[in-house]
Amino acid sequence: MQQLADHLIASGLFGAHPPRDLIYALIIFVLCLVVFMGIAFPFAAIVTWVERRVWARIQSRVGPNRVGPNGFLQWLADGVKLACKEDIIPNQADPRLFKAAPYLVMIAYVLPWAVVPFSSDLILADLNVGILYMTAVTALTVVGVLMAGWASNDKWSLIGGIRSAAQIVSYEIPAGLSIFPVVLITGTLSMQGIIRAQGWAPNNWFLFNNPFTFAAASILFISALAEGNRTPFDLPEAESELVAGYVTEYSGLRYLFFFMAEWGALFIIGAIVTALFLGGWQFPHLSHSRVVMNVLQLITFNVKVLSVVFLSMWIRATLPRVRIDQLMSLCWKYFVPMSFINLIGTALWVAIWPDGNPVAGYIMAVLAFVVLVIFLRRVIYYLRKSRMEIYVSPVI
Amino acid sequence: MGAVATYLGNIRQTVSSIFEGMAVTASHFVRKPYTVQYPDRMPIRVQDTLPFRYRGILEVDLEICTGCLACERACPIDCIVIVAEKHPQTKSMVLSQFDIDIAKCMFCGLCSEPCPTGSIHHTTEFEGADFSLESLIRRFVKEPVAAYRPKKGPETDPRIAPILSRGMNFLTQWAQPGGEKPPADEEAA
């Protein structure tokens, strides 16, 4: 952000002797407005419609298609409906905590956006502890969730809140340990620094840097799903056992806050995975214009993030919910040991090849491509087996 | 060694089963949905796709109703009300009321079985929702009308003939093997 401001001042946009602090304040205000009003909140709202449509197609249904063109305005109708509802606070609840919990969850959703690197210049704050800050503030959710579960004074809410707390705290460990390999390679915690250490080509991504980073990326993605309470790890909201978990007693706008934070966290998950392992906003240097490059980088970053978001929707439509003991055994028996192996393996790798091993990058990228081709062949096999005609149009 | 093999086997099984599952759902993602978007986004009305013997809302063809009251007697819940009297001069039956209360009707089809001409029959229409019970009563007689009298031999009136053949078609379609013969003769006599 400061770089962008300095660049603008040096270009003489604000005259010869500009009021520096005022311009900084102005730019950060405008950027905040762009990021939150342009991306953060619209994404959290619209992704509900996208996800419902994606599930519907996977389940041979149509999904919401009545409000607006192809149901695109469904999120608006849902939002208005929830906003118009009565805000009920149960008699036996602790009113202060009950009211505060949704705001805490919302804050935990809003804070990470400060270090989401949209392009080389468009970032609210390029903190030198960027990724550490990201993991720290996303874990704040657990406070709000536990507060909601406790304050509702309801068994379902409490069990949901406790489950969520156990889940988020447990999965913080493999998620944190999976970030270390990248930090080992780059030697920085800054989001922009990590992205600048990668290249635009897949073989320069950290996903394909060495086998250990690939495993780390998988563990980070799955742990992030668990932290975001996404299926197959949505135990806190397991409808069949806990009604709606910690949101059971909530209604109206407070309910909306919980769900906006949960849906919006998808973008944060995608942003972390993209920035650390998928090359972030890296794009071939096609133009000398700073503006054109930034736009291209912005598009690249968003396409990558939305691909990861689509993958998580797809997983949600595929896998059934795990049991609580399976959840914990997956975390402590499999992910934590594997994360340590990744950490040691990457450390050895960096010790042997301090400047990286370009051959390994090529080999892994080619292997990933081969796996993708095998996967597509399986998809075509299932399509042929059912003798269904292909229908890819999103409109019906 | 067995524990390690189990551990690694679990990982392999998880990865391969998720791989297969994702392939299945991906293949479903590019298929056409099965959803029938009733009622407004249909290529053809549902009513037109239903079979001939579908028991929808009852309908009466007054042109071929003989006024025999067989349907009124057959109805187990008395949802059919018919007023038919012999005209003093012409000696023919005059229908002055033929009401079917769709709110009471249970679509059993017992009324359409004894009908000698197939005048009362089911349609494929089923969208009968309305705002009051009174509007669910179907009044088929607007003003008193002479009942139909079967003639010896084929029907001569070109207006009645197609309706009658359609009504008789209902009877043959509905006829059950071994069922009672419709009491057409005694009523006509």
Image: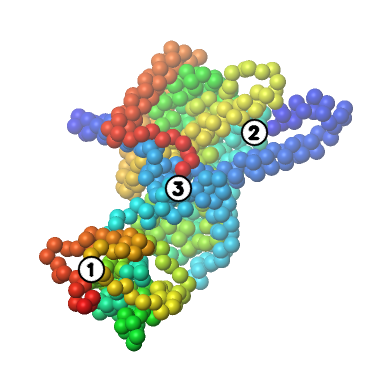
Q: Amino acid at mark 2?
A: Ile
Alpha carbon distance from label 2 to label 1? 95 Å
Quadrant location of residue B114?
Answer: bottom left
The residue under label 1 is B152
Q: Residue furthest bottom?
A: B88
Q: Quadrant of the N terminus of chain B?
A: top left
Q: Quadrant of residue B65?
A: bottom left
Looking at the image, can residue B133 be seen? no
Does residue A286 lie above or below A111 as drawn?
above
Q: Which residue carries the number 2 mark?
A: A123
- Image x and y of residue B18, in percent: 32, 35
Residue A63: mark = 3
The kind of residue tagged 3 is: Gly
Q: Residue furthest left?
A: B178
Q: In whole angstroms, how far apart are the C-alphas of marks 3 and 1?
A: 61 Å
Chain ID, mark 1: B
**In the depicted view, which residue is nearer to us: A17 or A396?**
A396
Question: Which of disc 3 and disc 2 is earlier in sequence?
Answer: 3
Instruction: From this view, report whether residue A320 is shown above or below residue B164.
Output: above
Q: Is circle 2 on the same chain as circle 1?
A: no
* Left or right: where A190 falls relative to A362: right
Q: Please state which of residues B23 and A237 is positioned toward the viewer in this rendering.
A: B23
Indicate whether A146 appears above or below A131. Answer: below
Chosen colour scheme:
rainbow
Whether residue B118 sits left or right of residue A144 in the image: it is left
Nearer to us of marks 3 and 1 is 1
